[in-house]
Image (spheres, rainbow, N blue to C red):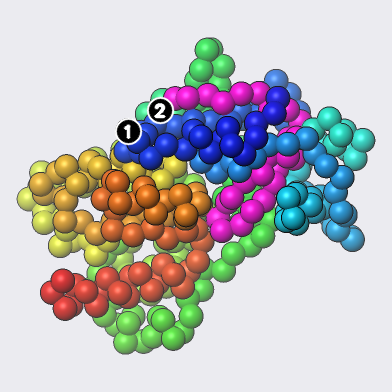
């Protein structure tokens, strides 16, 4: 199958945002098992070209592909999740899924590309208990009697290219940390590694953190606090939410927060590995206060410091 850049981009409609809609590019690795990746992250799909090797490379990073004037890293996704790697001879029959992920342009080497599937995030669920922690699985979708697996690419990339959660001392000063002890932030993300990274940034600044594994869980918690008489916008300095999550995505979460009289004043930052350029239009549509691309500890810390200053100024 060939999915070009134009056909993928045509599916990225602003009008779909906030309705919990999802389109997945389905692909295969070693077996008949289908995996999915959000079309929003896919730039193009093409047959695997010749790669420029990397000397003494022993990881799933297999080389560099030269595509339309760019040099793009190629990751063997099978090997990255602990399965049989693609041999050099096999590559000629394989595909590259070129993506924009966490501020990087990367390509994933896969054995086949099947189709694009339109669905909704509320059809996507956390993995069954027996599969938790296996093969970098973050969510599943049952379709036509088959279980489509959605991989935690953020965990894959974190293992391959570790990212620091340390905040620069000129941002997280002792004065900032002293003030930050008074504040509380909610972090929403279905990826364990992403949740841990953001939590470490905020707790390193002495901020109290409450976590939720997806938009539905976050909204339930917020509504429970409202039912108990809690002034939620005063309790939380901000909500920092991922966008791609099972059951309820970040866009829908923001919509639901803005529709609730008791929650609508919450300061909400969308934090995602989706393309920042695309999300500029999304933020305006759903009513989020800001967007920060994953993952930059200093940008997250700066957003918190600026919000603290705004609150202390009565804004």
Category of crowding for the residue at label 1, using alpha-carbon neighbours closer than 10 angstroms: few (below 14), some (14–19), many (at least 20): some
What element does badge 1 sit on?
loop
Is residue 215 shown left or right of residue 278?
left
Q: Residue at x 16, y 56 (%)?
A: 265
Left/right of residue 26 with respect to residue 242 in the rendered view: right
User: Considering depth in this image, is 4 or 109 the residue closer to the camera?
Assistant: 4
Q: Is residue 203 visible?
A: no
Quadrant of the drawing holding the N terminus: top right
Picture coordinates of residue 54, whole percent (x, y): 86, 58
Above or below, comparing residue 289 to residue 3 in the picture: below
Task: Look at 38% across and 85% down and name the residue there.
Answer: 173
Please give the name of the residue rendered at 62% of the width and 39% of the height, measured from the top-left corner.
5
Disc 2 is placed on an element classified as strand
Indicate whether residue 120 is drawn in magenta.
Answer: yes
Q: Are marks 2 and 1 in contact (CB under 8 Å)?
A: yes
**At which x and y percent is residue 34?**
63, 25
7 displayed left or right of 230: right
Residue 109 percent across, percent down from the top left: 74, 40
Q: Can residue 222 be seen here?
A: yes
* Figure quadrant of residue 14: top left
Q: How much space separates mark 2 and mark 1, taking CA atoms?
A: 8 Å
State the predominant SS element of the stretch in magenta: strand
In the displayed structure, 132 sits above or below 102; it is: above
Q: Which residues are magenta?
A: 95-121
Q: Residue at x 59, y 37 (%)?
A: 6
In the image shown, does 174 or 89 lie closer to the viewer? 89
| Residue located beneath label 1 in the image | 19
In the rendered structure, find residue 120 and report the number of the disc placed on it: 2
Q: Residue furthest left?
A: 229
Locate residue 114, reporting x and y percent. Answer: 66, 23
């Amino acid at each position: 199958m060939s999915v070009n850049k134009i056909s993928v981009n045509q599916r990225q409609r602003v009008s779909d945002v906030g309705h919990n809609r999802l389109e997945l590019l389905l692909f295969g690795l070693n077996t008949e098992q289908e995996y999915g990746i959000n079309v929003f992250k896919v730039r193009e799909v093409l047959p695997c070209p010749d790669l420029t090797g990397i000397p003494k490379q022993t990881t799933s990073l297999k080389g560099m592909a030269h595509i339309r004037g760019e040099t793009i890293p190629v990751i063997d996704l099978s090997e990255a999740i602990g399965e049989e790697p693609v041999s050099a001879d096999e590559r000629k029959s394989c595909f590259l899924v070129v993506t924009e992920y966490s501020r990087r342009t990367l390509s994933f080497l896969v054995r086949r590309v099947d189709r694009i599937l339109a669905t909704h995030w509320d059809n996507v669920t956390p993995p069954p208990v027996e599969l938790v922690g296996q093969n970098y699985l973050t969510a599943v979708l049952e379709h036509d009697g088959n279980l489509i697996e959605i991989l935690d690419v953020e965990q894959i990339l974190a293992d391959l290219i570790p990212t620091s959660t340390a905040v620069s001392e000129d941002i997280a000063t002792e004065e900032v940390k002293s003030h930050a002890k008074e504040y509380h932030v909610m972090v929403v993300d279905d990826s364990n590694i992403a949740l841990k990274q953001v939590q470490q940034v905020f707790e390193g600044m002495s901020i109290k953190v409450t976590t939720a594994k997806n938009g539905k869980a976050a909204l339930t918690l917020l509504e429970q606090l409202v039912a108990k008489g809690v002034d939620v916008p005063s309790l939380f300095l901000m909500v920092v939410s991922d966008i791609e999550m099972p059951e309820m995505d970040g866009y829908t979460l923001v919509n639901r927060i803005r529709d609730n009289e008791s929650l609508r004043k919450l300061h909400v930052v969308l934090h995602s590995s989706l393309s920042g350029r695309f999300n500029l239009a999304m933020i305006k549509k759903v009513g989020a206060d800001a967007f920060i691309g994953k993952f930059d500890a200093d940008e997250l810390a700066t957003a918190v410091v600026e919000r603290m200053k705004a609150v202390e100024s009565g804004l």
